[in-house]
Amino acid sequence: MLPETIRGAVAGSVIPTDPGAERPGGSGAALTAGRSPGAAPRVGYVLKMFPRFSETFVLTELLALQQHGVPVGVFSLRLPDDGRFHRELSLLEAPVHHIGGHHLRTAELWALLGAARTALPGLVLHLDDLLDAEVGEAAQAVLLAGAAVENGITHLHAHFASIAARVARLAARLAGITYSVTAHAKDIFVDDIDDAELARTLGDAHTVVTISRYNADHLAARFPEIGDRLRLVRNGIDLAGFPFRADLVHRPPRIAAIGRLVEKKGFGYLLQAAALLRDRGVGFHLDLVGTGALATVLAADVQQLGLADRVRLHGAQPQDRVREVVAGAAVLAAPCVVGADGNRDGLPTVLLEAMALGTPCVSTPVTGIGEAVVPGRTGLLVPERDPRALADALESLLTDRALGAGLAAAARRLVEQDYDTRRQAAAVAAGFGVPTAAPEGALR
């Protein structure tokens, strides 16, 4: 049992995953029960923030693990800052714990270390690691390690090789357990990433998962020491929630675009392409769903380009509404770009959703996007920051529905083969030592 001083700092304890109902306990009772010999490992998912409206892939993966019977607890390093929740969150049975402590001052950290040294024998052995860490991360690592011990967690898995992975790494060392990490894009490509710190974070991991061949090749070249622990497991979606619709020929000429309104999504170029389509006399309407820092800029662009009667900015929408917009569109546009700071998308989940639903896609060859949107086979790719090429591709799919139908059918087959969350979650779990049937070829 942890000292009360530590238990008290694990703020919030259990966050209800159903926004409308308190559910203390739930499957947490099973998670905290004594572990019998030979029982499956118990996994703690470490997220900077959970739930997060824009990270549907994390929730999808957790729900798939739940279907596989993998005992999982979720540890969030920050409280959610968004009152919106996807309806599917209510299906998650895993207990969600908030780990406080990231605002601790140095003096408070020392008091925490003193209180934790009995419950965490590994603390003394790894004191140098804690001293090298930022104060808030060190405090959260101590608290997370205590929570892991308290809950019988045997392995920690972090999404994103940044703060979540750094805290998971430290906590795993303190608790004497293993950890793994899924690397996406922002966490490995942004210009100001500290290479030495990232090497340390990935270098100690039991397994490093990443979501595309592009990412895997990049990491293998940059950090060859992790090569034998590097696994390619693509993001998955729940295909049951995205049934294929073969009605493309009857859909109105609507373009759907979904995502946060930030530089890397490239939506400014999409508006320029829309103006070109209008000037060419192409009939269309653009539905842009999302919110973000560029909302005001994009709204001004719509007015300046004279597109107010062609473009609707919907703001952020729940997953079922997003699905409705994508399924009713003749084409989905994801004009991703590499941002000025190196930030970029790994593979927007909405691309996979559109491919599953039978909506043909136009995107750009940023990171691993071309592995899903294979040019001329499962979709169309255009150079990034090229409104004219983007307009050409959109026009071809708006006016040639047979072309779009062929691409959409092939895209659905590819998603079923490589992006089915049931198979992908099993592949992730295999890295935890959980005995699930990982699909052949899914692991590097």
Image: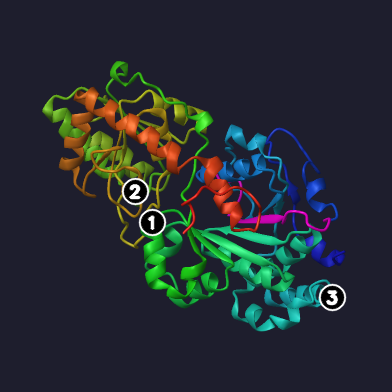
Q: Judge the density around disc 2: few (<14), some (14-19), many (≥20) Cα neighbours within 10 Å.
A: some
Q: Of marks 3 and 2, which one's residue comes earlier in the chain?
A: 3
**Closer to the camera: disc 3 or disc 1?**
1
The amino acid on which the numbered mark 3 sits, given as a three-letter code, is Thr
Instruction: In the rendered structure, find residue 213 and report the number of the disc placed on it.
Output: 1
Q: Which mark is residue 371?
A: 2
Q: Give percent across and percent down for residue 135.
A: 63, 74
Kindly identify the residue that appears in the image at 55 percent across and 51 percent down.
427
Q: Mark 1 or mark 3, which is nearer the start of the sequence?
A: 3
Q: How many marks?
A: 3
Q: Which residue is mark 3?
A: 118
Give me the C-alpha separation between circle 3 and circle 2.
Answer: 50 Å
Image coordinates of residue 428 in percent, x first then y, are 56, 53
Residue 164 visible from this viewpoint = no
Q: Residue at x 32, y 21 (%)?
A: 248
Q: Position of residue 54 (x, y in %)?
A: 50, 44
Left/right of residue 304 with respect to residue 63 in the rendered view:
left
Q: Observer-nearest residue: 342 or 185?
A: 185
Mark 1 neighbour density, 10 Å: few (under 14) some (14–19) many (20 or more): some
Marks 2 and 1 sit apart, C-alpha to C-alpha, by: 8 Å
Q: Give the residues drawn in magenta, as a range.
A: 35-53
Q: Residue furthest front?
A: 440
Tags 2 and 1 in contact by the CB under 8 Å rule?
yes
Q: Main secondary structure of the magenta part?
A: loop
Q: How is the image coloured?
A: rainbow
Q: Is residue 420 left or right of residue 23?
A: left
> What amino acid is at disc 1?
Arg
Dot 1: what SS? helix
User: Residue sitting at 42 percent across and 32 percent down?
Assistant: 356
